Image: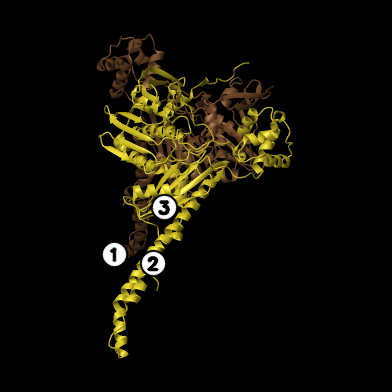
Chain colours: A yellow, B brown
């Protein structure tokens, strides 16, 4: 073949090289935001590790400066400890991890902590230090990433005796940071983490050496969300193909029952017959067009709604308590919506409206959470902000509330994040609708509270009027009637005070 | 080792599986936005291919419905045609491409068109059809992606005779779309593309069969940006390590000169001596700490600023003409800033303010571009929006302008996008500052125009007064002086009209 026009050279890069070139995508856009991201990724890794093992998290974070811009971070948890043989890959390889199942978890991308290591390496040139133990010997690993190959490079290993049966993980990183500019966001992150994970205790030592302790307010680890099968409405052509490949040799009936949640034999049989498939047809005989037809039929068939046991909302009581503790508002209205579905993924929305908060300037402040993680940056394009922007407070409260904090929490097996930095949620209409409904419910509750307050004030006003004039009226009436002693009005006044009048 | 606490299972996923699970990250968050994204990725692929080969782009786009929600897209260009042997990888493998150099290009992630194929495959279940030719035989490939492995799967190949010496690429995809909801954005995308790439001709046939033609207004392809070496201020520890690895056996002096732009032998020698390195030291003898010291010294040394020849701004004239053609404003002020640098990456900012535009409702509308690509979504968190939000129009124009469009274009070898969907630019302070300076300059020019307009009006007012009273004054004065004929005032009036008075 004759080449008539010059064509460019082609090549391939690794996924780590991709994120090295485009670290803004993962939220590491400048030293200030990177400081927040590094802390956040390490803390969330620790929280997830503890919760998966059913351990109440104790997390110690300390940040210090070792140079002009060079920060040193140390994060220690009391989790189960990553197995030493897994440390290089779990920390030093992108898209390697333990969080790829259908289940709610903080980390979902398999790149958070590895991204922190990468940022550390390219800005400080130094390896990360990881220390782990499951209660037996302690293992220390010095780790770099071969970014061009997306492979971990172990620079040193040590095995130490564990005299105190310590278990957990310690991550130590050097990186180019800017704490002063990130301080406000980082403190907000810890405060909100303490609301979304009230069972965790976090101690943060800042570069000035001051310790900030975020105490545990719930003494029980949340029910660990269970991993589930996908829902028939939650699969696409690709997923269906994969599931079929794993069920080779089975009948369609058994495939449906074993591959999906909420599909029993009766449902599966009814569905397959309505879709024109024989329940006994082996999956291996399906043609490409059959697969698409099956998918189309699954979309249109009305299966029972997805199982929400794989979700772990904060809960109305825990959320209210945590908000009362941290924001000390006059009143909190909390609403947890029943489970709902977008694209086959179950999700639960929780909204709280805290009225008359201490330390809130201006009218309304929005705090967002997703799978118990506070979202600090990029609020402008978030689904909750969209709902809030067009929400008509007047029609619920007659006025726009003052010093009010709105909290939104979305938990799902699949949060539709807009960015790999996990700061901003996209807006499937189903999610938008649930947030709006929850917000309305909170407003109704807040209104009842405010109306109640008005009626107490009104009653007080009336009581004062009666108290002033009733004795005079009684005396005047007595005189008119020629009686010597006016009747005792205190009984009437008491009844008015009790609101029985 | 005794396992004391249960630990989770670990595993790995491919980069294609990652983007399959998190397609929102690449902008494919719902059928409406995905419709826009699929079109955009295909069009930009075509524009880049044509420009790299120095060809004036002719691009034909047609979108139709083949079912309720199933769209069919066909995009044809007159580019050099991807080599047939490269088609499977260039289209069907993530992070494989021809755009990884230090140079300005529309596509930078190596995932745009592959993401479009992936979205097509998972929502339609059908393979993509790619047709290419460089002017010789025509090759047709039916392509799927093995998403679990990030590998292309060729489903069929054909070789056809090319009677008309056609060259270019054709991409055909089926996908779940929502054109009605995306229509406004898609039309805006084409309109703005026609402003940023006035040398391209694009014909778009919409699902109703209507053809929209965006004509070429510049008959010359833009100067192709050259690929350059990195600037010493643009490298980090990782990049420096890679460059050193590629220069094994060389002296530090030769390494500096051959690896970086703007570093000649004199500069290199002066720099190395000031940093305490011998110019003759072989690169292979550098220890880890040496590398960090060298990096630190490079950051602090004042090298000449980066070469901006690798950038291709639209240009003030082309930008003004295109805006006049499309928005028909009363006046356009355009400002191209001189090249600047953030983190060692050169960039150029162009801003235009078009006053009194047709078809603009409200006060000020922002249109954003990056490397000649219009950015349609997620304006809220963009750096240009941040600048605009706090910009004090009053101090430049006395009033906020009406029916005004602000255009910002940033071109760089590395645009700091916040999302892989390439819609929103992060805000390094250097970029923010340049946008603000350009906007101020445009405002000054607009002010001069508006002041000029005021003075024309003022002159007219004065002329009318003179025209009315001067003849009467002349007549009155003549009568007073006892003259019979009043002098001719038309000469004076003419001079006033010409503004000489």
Closer-to-camera residue (A185/B463): A185
Tell me the quarter of the image containing the N terminus of chain A.
top right
Residue A143: where, in percent of width, then height? 39, 21
Q: Is residue A441 above or below residue A187?
A: below
Q: Chain of mark 1?
A: B
Q: How many labels were placed on the picture?
A: 3
- Per the image, label 2 sits on a secondary structure element best described as helix
Seen at 33% across and 33% down, the residue is: A61
Q: Which mark is residue B477?
A: 1
Q: Is residue B20 above or below residue B388?
A: above
Q: Which mark is residue A353?
A: 3
- Label 2 or label 3, whichever lies nearer to me, is 2
Circles 1 and 3: CB atoms closer than 8 Å: no
Label 1 to label 3, Cα distance in Å?
82 Å
Q: Quadrant of residue A284?
A: top right
Q: Chain of mark 3?
A: A
Q: Give the side of residue B457 with respect to residue B25, left or right.
A: left
Is tag 2's residue or tag 3's residue first in the polypeptide sequence? 3
Closer-to-camera residue (B320/B342): B342
Circle 2 is placed at which residue position? A455
Residue B42: where, in percent of width, then height? 57, 32
């Amino acid at each position: 073949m004759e080449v008539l026009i010059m064509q460019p050279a082609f090549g391939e890069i690794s996924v780590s090289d991709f994120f090295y070139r485009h670290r803004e995508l993962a939220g590491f856009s400048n030293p200030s935001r990177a400081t927040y991201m590094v802390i956040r990724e390490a803390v969330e890794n620790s929280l997830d590790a503890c919760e998966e093992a059913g351990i109440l998290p104790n997390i110690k974070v300390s940040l210090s400066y070792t140079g002009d811009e060079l920060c040193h971070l140390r994060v220690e948890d009391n989790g189960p400890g990553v197995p030493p043989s897994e440390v290089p890959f779990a920390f030093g390889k992108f898209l390697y991890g333990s969080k790829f199942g259908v289940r709610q978890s903080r980390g979902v991308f398999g790149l958070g902590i590895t991204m922190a290591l990468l940022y550390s390496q390219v800005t400080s040139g130094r390896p990360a230090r990881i220390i782990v133990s499951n209660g037996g010997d302690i293992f220390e690993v010095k780790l770099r990433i071969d970014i061009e190959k997306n492979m971990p490079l172990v620079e040193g290993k040590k095995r130490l005796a564990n005299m105190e049966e310590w278990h957990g993980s310690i991550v130590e990183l050097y990186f180019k940071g800017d704490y002063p500019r990130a301080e406000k966001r980082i403190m907000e992150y810890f405060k909100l983490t303490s609301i979304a994970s009230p069972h965790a205790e976090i101690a943060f030592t800042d570069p000035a050496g001051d310790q900030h302790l975020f105490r545990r307010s719930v003494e029980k680890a949340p029910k660990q969300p269970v991993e589930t099968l996908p829902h028939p409405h939650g699969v696409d052509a690709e997923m269906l193909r994969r599931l079929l490949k794993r069920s080779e040799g089975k009948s369609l009936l058994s495939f449906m029952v074993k591959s999906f949640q909420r599909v029993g034999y009766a449902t599966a049989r009814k569905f397959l017959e309505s879709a024109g498939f024989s329940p006994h047809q082996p999956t291996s005989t399906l043609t490409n067009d059959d697969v698409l037809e099956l998918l189309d039929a699954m979309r249109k068939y009305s299966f029972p709604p997805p199982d929400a046991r794989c979700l772990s909302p904060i809960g109305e009581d825990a959320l209210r308590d945590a908000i009362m503790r941290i924001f000390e508002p006059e009143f909190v209205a909390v609403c947890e919506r029943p489970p709902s579905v977008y694209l086959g993924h179950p999700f639960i929305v929780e909204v709280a409206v805290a009225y008359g908060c201490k330390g809130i300037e201006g009218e309304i402040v929005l705090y967002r959470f997703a799978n118990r993680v506070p979202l600090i940056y990029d609020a402008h394009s978030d689904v909750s902000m969209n709902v809030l922007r067009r929400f008509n407070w007047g029609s619920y409260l007659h006025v726009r509330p003052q010093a009010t904090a709105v909290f939104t929490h979305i938990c799902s097996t699949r949060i539709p994040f807009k960015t790999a930095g996990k700061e901003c949620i996209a807006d499937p209409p189903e999610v938008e609708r649930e947030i709006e409904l929850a917000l309305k419910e909170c407003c109704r509750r807040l209104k009842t509270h405010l109306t109640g307050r008005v009626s107490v004030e009104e009653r007080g006003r009336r009581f004062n009027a009666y108290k002033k004039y009733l004795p005079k009226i009684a005396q005047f009436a007595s005189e008119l009637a020629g009686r010597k002693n006016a009747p005792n009005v205190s009984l009437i006044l008491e009844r008015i005070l009790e609101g029985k009048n």
